[in-house]
Amino acid sequence: MRLMIDLFRAADGRLEGVVHTPDVGHTEFAGVLDLLRVLEGIDLCAPVDPDPTQRPDDDG
């Protein structure tokens, strides 16, 4: 399974972002504990990416 995380630090120092997974789509989080909850809820039995070397936004 391939997992992508868009991560940034808010003005108050909190980590925020979005976790992208093939089975769920995307889930937003605010804070480290929230991120851990999102990661814990991911179904590891989801279909495997057929070509993990290619990203959807790659040009080649």
Image (cartoon, rainbow, N blue to C red):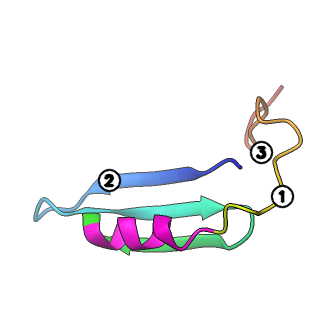
Q: Residue furthest top?
A: 60
Look at 59% across and 68% down and name the residue there: 42
Residue 34 relative to residue 40: left or right: left
Residue type beneath disc 2: Phe
Residue 56: mark: 3
Main secondary structure type of the part rendered in magenta: helix
Look at 61% across and 51% down and name the residue there: 3
Residue type beneath disc 1: Pro
Residue type beneath disc 3: Pro
Q: Gap in Å between the C-alphas at discs 2 and 1? A: 28 Å
Percent x, y for residue 2? 68, 47
Look at 52% across and 62% down and name the residue there: 19
- Helix or strand or loop: what does disc 3 sit on? loop
Q: Quadrant of residue 24?
A: bottom right
Viewer-nearest residue: 13 or 3: 3
Eye-nearest disc, 1 or 3: 1
Look at 48% across and 64% down and name the residue there: 39
Q: Earlier in the sequence, mark 2 or mark 1?
A: 2
Q: For the C terminus, which image quadrant?
A: top right
Percent x, y for residue 23? 74, 69
- State the extent of the magenta-drawn residues as a range: 33-42
Percent x, y for residue 5? 50, 53
Q: Is residue 48 above or below residue 29?
A: above
Crowding at label 2, few (<14), some or many (≥20) Cα neighbours within 10 Å?
Answer: few
Q: Is residue 13 in the magenta section?
A: no
Q: Is residue 36 in the magenta section?
A: yes
Q: Earlier in the sequence, mark 1 or mark 3?
A: 1
- Helix or strand or loop: what does disc 2 sit on? strand
Residue 47: mark: 1
Q: Gap in Å between the C-alphas at discs 3 and 2? A: 21 Å
